Amino acid sequence: MKKVLVVDDSPIILSMLKIEIAKYNRMEPYYAKTYKEAFRLLREHKGKFHAALLDLNLPDVPSGEIVKLANSHGIPSVVLTSKVDEQVQKSLLKKDVLSVILKNDHASIKVAVADISRTLSNYDTTVLIVDDSKLFRQILRTSLEKIQLNVLEARDGEEAYNILESSKEKISLIITDYEMPKRNGLDLTLKIREKYQKDELAIIAISAVETKDIISKFLKFGANDFVNKPFEHTEVVTRVNANLELLDLFAKIRDMANKDFLTGAYNRRYFFESGEPIYAKNKRKETPMAVAMIDIDKFKNINDTYGHDIGDIAIQEIKKILDKNLRTSDLMARFGGEEFCVFLEDITIEDAKILFEKIRKAFEENVLDANGTKILYTVSTGIYYGFSISLDEMIRLSDEALYTAKEGGRNRVEIKS
């Protein structure tokens, strides 16, 4: 969650803002109706807000004073105003202001909150600028850092590709010039598209070359967008944000296809799509792997006693506890109902036993507070360790181990090898 300061003296506008902000789960809003209230919030939080939504005119100070206050704390802001003056707008945009929006209807409020949401996402987004001109890289860096993006730089296409391949940070967008030594922007775009699709890594080409042939080649080779030099700050920021929004949309669509709606865990289809290559790699090396099936004990009793809504919360709790205990490299999916499957590589049989015994104990000691109802429940786990003839067979054998754990009294971990 990222903190957002919201200041407006209109109860109607504040009400609209609250409704719109509630749609975004990344925002932690703090509301004020006056400069004095905003000043108090800034003092309480030591000025540490990630963004601000500000009414340009407040009753207790001259016009624009609230923007100066936010600016003094380095808070990127969206300014709301009932009247747009072009000179005032230009003056504001030279400061730490993301946009100036006329607050004349609900649609404009939606745009303002969306701008804030994009900025909050940008804190965790990395962009790579590729250009042999140090001056141009600095100009572009200034524009992108203003909207809170993390910026990396490369002097040519060859250096850019090396950074892309070696960077610990996930690079979401590359902005590349056309004419550069060693590897130009077209070659870089073509090279990147051999490995990265347009819906996972965006490329914006920027060039002073305005011939349609160059523009069409960039788009044909896989660029998402093209901007001519010289450009206005607002133009490049708009294009960058639009491309990042598209990447977010593609990610959401992938999540809808690959993840279970109730828990957010991967689904059975994704498990096999991702698990088969992992299985094949370790089978070739004759490296043992572990598959674990986890199931809530006496789940029917929970549904019958407390209702299916509470049963759903109990299922969601499985994902939460597994997330706390598994490695990021472990593949975990909901297979259906209250049953989850975990696929682990690079683990010994001893460590597998220790891990799932720890998970079993975490469930045993966990008190689930479901809408005021306190529930205790346990899980049973069946593990197959080794490298059987297929991933399907490993799952079947772990299912057998799970059955043995259930028959042995439940709240147990049973392992086959």
Image (spheres, helix red, strand yellow):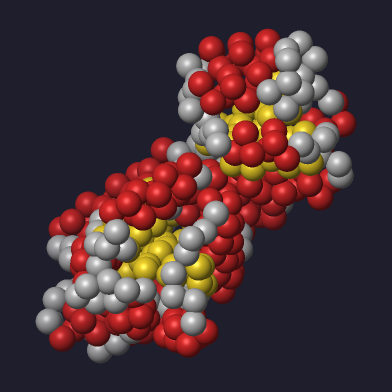
Confirm whether residue 314 shows in the render. Answer: no
Q: Residue at point 54% right, 45% down?
A: 119
337 to 283, vertically: above or below: above
Residue 364: % across, % down: 41, 43
* Quadrant (top left/top right/bottom left/bottom right) for the C terminus: bottom left
Name the foreground residue: 118 vs 225. Answer: 225
270 to 317, vertically: above or below: below
Q: Residue at point 22% right, 52% down?
A: 354
114 to 402, vertically: above or below: above
Residue 178: % across, % down: 36, 74
Q: Is residue 387 left or right of residue 340?
A: left
Residue 264: % across, % down: 53, 59
Tell me which corner region of the image, top left, top right, bottom left or bottom right, holds residue 174.
bottom left
Count of all numbered marks drawn on residues in the image = 0
Q: Residue at point 86% right, 44% down?
A: 105
Residue 283: % across, % down: 19, 83
289 to 149, vertically: above or below: below
Tell me which corner region of the image, top left, top right, bottom left or bottom right, holds residue 274.
bottom left
Name the foreground residue: 43 vs 288. Answer: 43
Q: Residue at point 51% right, 67% down?
A: 227
Q: Is residue 374 left or right of residue 15?
A: left
Name the foreground residue: 119 vs 170. Answer: 119
Confirm whether residue 399 shows in the render. Answer: yes
